Image: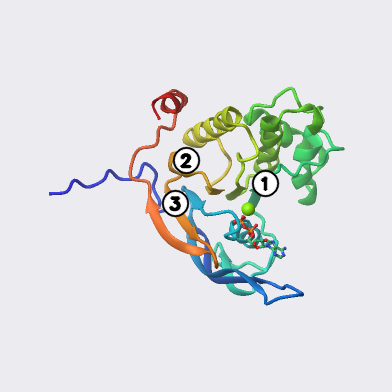
Amino acid sequence: MMQQPPAPNRQTTGTELVRIIDCRQAYHKESSADLVVLDGVNLSIRSGEIVGLLGRSGSGKSTLLRIIAGLLPPTAGEVIWKGSRLTGPADGISMVFQSFALFPWLTVQKNVELGLEAQGVPPAERLKLAEDAISLIGLGGYENAYPKELSGGMRQRVGLARALVVKPDLLLMDEPFSALDVLTAENLRTDLVELWAEKKLPIQSILLVTHNIEEAVLMCDRILIFSSNPGRVAHELQVPFEHPRNREDLAFRQFVD
Ligand code: ADP
Ligand code: MG
């Protein structure tokens, strides 16, 4: 008899945060037919899970993230966020970008405070919340530095702190490690996974876009494989083993793999 795979190490039975129903996205092209990037995208993310979205470059992953973030209305279909149709940027969804997207003329502290300013949080509270987020992701002491004074890995930590400071339910991560060198990426990934495992991140779920299979397997409870032309969820994989979600095990894996 075939052995049952062990249950995933994280419950995926939490409440549904977001559901994408039959989303289609076509970009208008002046000189040729519209480019259909997404067609028939369906997916759902529940609280408590890290979901990977694995697909080729150009398959529409960033487009889909922009739709979920409420930054781009889909050409057809809908995004249901906590039971209601999403019509624009929602409270409770934050994004981390591949290229960090920091403001170079603002300090680390001010970059992180930006999201709070938009929400009308008073200055004293902003200061405290931003300091907490900065220290959580390991940048305590760098509050007054400018992005150009920081390494790529540190800049992405600022990007993470800025996303986390609003304590979002869902964190969207668009190839967050792909602009970093291998060891820096490994470090940040390990820190993130450890904070998640220790439940220190003020979030419910992560949707991680990546084209790195190992990264998806190491970090995610569930992996959606995205097809290209047009992009849609072609397969779904449950990660069938306990994650090595502590620093020693993750470091060890680097050498055995
Ligand atoms: P991925 O993140 O998977 O690499 P993208 O969503 O960035 O894919 O892009 C998918 C396709 O849509 C690409 O062919 C890209 O050139 C095109 N595209 C992305 N954004 C736009 C835009 N704003 N206008 C027109 N075409 C776009
Ligand atoms: Mg992309």
Asked whether, in this view, residue 147 is left or right of residue 39, the answer is: right
Q: Earlier in the sequence, mark 1 or mark 2?
A: 1
Mark 3: amino acid: Ile
Q: Position of residue 185 (x, y in %)?
A: 58, 33
Q: Which residue is mark 2?
A: 219
SS assignment at label 2: helix
SS assignment at label 3: strand
Residue at the location (52% across, 54% down)? 55
Residues at circles 3 and 2 in contact by the CB criterion of under 8 Å: no
Asked whether, in this view, residue 240 is left or right of residue 200, the answer is: left
Q: Which residue is mark 1?
A: 97
Disc 3: CA contacts within 10 A as few (<14), some (14-19) or many (>=20): many
Q: How many marks?
A: 3
- Cα separation, mark 3 vs mark 2, equals 10 Å
Mark 1: amino acid: Phe
Residue at the extreme front of the image, as rendered: 31
Asked whether, in this view, residue 235 is left or right of residue 100, the answer is: left
Is residue 15 shown to the viewer in this render? no
Residues at circles 1 and 3 in contact by the CB criterion of under 8 Å: no
Residue at the location (47% across, 35% down)? 197
Asked whether, in this view, residue 78 is left or right of residue 127, the answer is: left
Disc 1: CA contacts within 10 A as few (<14), some (14-19) or many (>=20): many
